[in-house]
């Protein structure tokens, strides 16, 4: 009976934790025997505690080992042997026994607002909605998620007729994501019981207890038609997934009857009647039919929806509230998974952004370095081009100088050639003139051999000197 073990495991843990004097998550077997014997007596199993000593080879047990023993030696005998109501009664009795074991530490509080019975009722609500948690190197413990605490506290507030401050609770939930039972009770008493009479607290707690533990889908006054008398009588109806029970008053002390509900049960709306009972509907289950009338159309629709929910869950293996709690847990896990995925995506995007930013910075630095290198190369190129231009200009200047020198040399050679030609002509003329003089001298000798010869000789000497002087000048000018 794994489902039954799961349903009572939270209450059993609280009893186990109350017996853990050393607060190390382990309890001596001798102390667990009394609890085991009490549970066995409730379920009609005698001497179930005797095998506890041989279970494991230690003198003490952790909670998982103890729960395994209860599942194997006690709860497994319930498999297929009891109906739902008996199973629910066993569940209630086991939680009552566990409460007797652990209530001492829960009833001893600094601030007391709830009567003891209210604390017990909230204890059962806590056991229904709580979950076993175990952190590494720490004992297992029962904790209640902040979302579930908010759900219970909000319903408690509404039962007191107070407005719910979601923002105020969110501030608490950010600090305490998981609640132990002592913290859960302290929160309810310190935050939501101020200026409320004890009677109001008892009624509000009872309403919350009925919704969660008794699995009450809806309760309220309806008129029921008494067929054999033909009259309508106002009764107090309580709807649970398995039954629709009606009482003579809202204190639920005088039970007037009940209807067993199944998935084949039906609810139908009825037309208005001349008697003024216009908001009528009938509930049919098996051979039984209830002709009912609501005070207004809104109540009628709410009862019909609640009845249809009861039909749907009448054969379910778990209670309606546990189904809702499991759904909320699934939604929380999905939301947490989505949040973790979003956070992972955000971190991945942040890492990618940091990588891209780093790559961009590196690229900018590389571009800047490349720009500086390019600027240096361009500057070097400009220097080289300037040097090349200077060399080219120097070559052009050298070529110009060379050309000028070549031209000057050519002119010099031409001038020298002209001087040499002039010299050759003069020498030729001189030779001719000498020949002519010789001829003249010879001829003059004939006329005037003495004076003319001397005179001519003197003239020739003079001319010779002049020519010699001119030749010297020419040679100086043209080496």
Image (tube, rainbow, N blue to C red):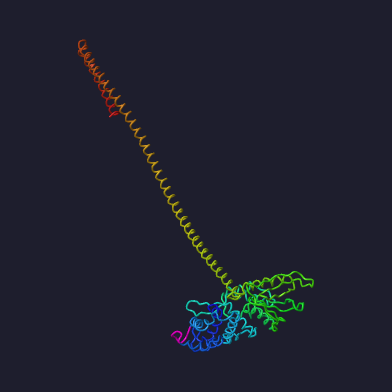
* Quadrant housing residue 79: bottom right
Pick the residue in front: 5 or 110.
5
Q: Extreme top residue here? A: 447
Magenta stretch: helix, strand or loop mostly? loop
Viewer-closest of 114 and 236: 236
Q: Is residue 145 left or right of residue 238?
A: left
Residue 462 placement (x, y as % from top left): 26, 20
Q: Nearer the viewer, residue 252 or 30?
A: 252
Q: Quadrant of the C terminus?
A: top left
The count of marks equals 0
Specify whether residue 382 is painted magenta. no
- In percent of width and height, residue 218 lies at 67, 75
Range covered by the magenta-colored residues: 54-61
Q: Is 274 located above or below residue 188 in the figure?
A: above
Rendering quarter of residue 155: bottom right
Indicate the position of residue 267 as horizontal and vertical percent values.
Answer: 68, 71
Horizontal arrangement in the rendering, residue 248 relative to residue 190 (left or right): right
Q: Is 60 left, or right, of 431 in this rendering? A: right
Considering depth in this image, is 51 or 447 the residue closer to the camera? 51
Question: Magenta segment: does it hold 58?
Answer: yes
Residue 13 on image: x %, y %: 54, 82
């Amino acid at each position: 009976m794994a489902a039954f073990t799961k349903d009572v495991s939270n209450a059993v843990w609280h009893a186990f934790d109350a017996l853990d004097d050393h607060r190390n998550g382990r309890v001596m077997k001798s102390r667990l025997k009394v609890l085991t014997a009490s549970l066995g007596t409730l379920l009609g199993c005698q001497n179930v505690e005797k095998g506890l000593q041989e279970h494991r080879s230690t003198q003490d047990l952790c909670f998982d080992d103890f729960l395994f023993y209860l599942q194997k030696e006690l709860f497994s005998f319930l498999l297929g042997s009891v109906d739902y109501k008996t199973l629910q009664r066993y569940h209630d009795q086991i939680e009552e026994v566990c409460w007797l074991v652990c209530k001492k530490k829960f009833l001893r509080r600094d601030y007391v607002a709830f009567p003891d019975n209210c604390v017990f009722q909230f204890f059962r609500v806590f056991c229904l909605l709580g979950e076993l948690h175990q952190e590494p190197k720490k004992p297992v413990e029962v904790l209640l998620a902040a979302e579930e605490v908010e759900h219970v506290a909000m319903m408690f507030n509404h039962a007191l007729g107070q407005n719910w401050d979601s923002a105020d609770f969110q501030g608490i939930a950010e600090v305490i994501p998981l609640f132990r039972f002592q913290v859960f009770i302290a929160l309810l008493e310190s935050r939501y019981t101020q200026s409320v009479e004890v009677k109001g607290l008892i009624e509000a707690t009872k309403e919350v207890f009925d919704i969660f533990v008794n699995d009450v889908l809806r309760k309220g006054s309806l008129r029921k038609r008494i067929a054999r008398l033909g009259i309508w009588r106002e009764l107090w109806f309580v709807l649970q997934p398995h039954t629709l029970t009606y009482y003579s008053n809202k204190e639920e002390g005088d039970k007037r009857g009940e209807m067993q509900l199944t998935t084949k049960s039906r609810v139908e709306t009825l037309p208005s009647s001349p008697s003024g009972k216009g908001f009528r509907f009938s509930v049919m289950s098996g051979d039984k039919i209830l002709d009912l009338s609501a005070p207004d159309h809104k109540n009628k629709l709410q009862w019909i929806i609640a009845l249809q929910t009861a039909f749907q869950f009448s054969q379910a293996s778990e209670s309606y509230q546990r189904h809702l709690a499991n759904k909320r847990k699934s939604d929380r896990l999905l939301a947490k998974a989505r949040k973790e995925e979003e956070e992972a995506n955000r971190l991945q995007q942040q890492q990618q952004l940091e990588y891209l930013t780093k790559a961009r910075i590196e690229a900018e630095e590389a571009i800047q370095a490349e720009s500086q290198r390019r600027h240096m190369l361009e500057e070097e190129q400009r220097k080289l081009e300037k040097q090349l231009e200077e060399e080219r200009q120097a070559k052009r200047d050298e070529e110009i100088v060379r050309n000028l020198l070549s031209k000057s040399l050519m002119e010099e050679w031409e001038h020298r050639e002209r001087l040499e030609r002039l010299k050759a002509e003069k020498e030729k003329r001189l030779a001719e003139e000498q020949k002519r003089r010789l001829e003249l001298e010879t001829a003059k000798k004939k006329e005037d051999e003495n004076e003319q010869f001397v005179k001519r000789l003197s003239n020739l000497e003079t001319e010779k000197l002049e020519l010699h002087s001119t030749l010297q000048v020419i040679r100086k000018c043209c080496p």
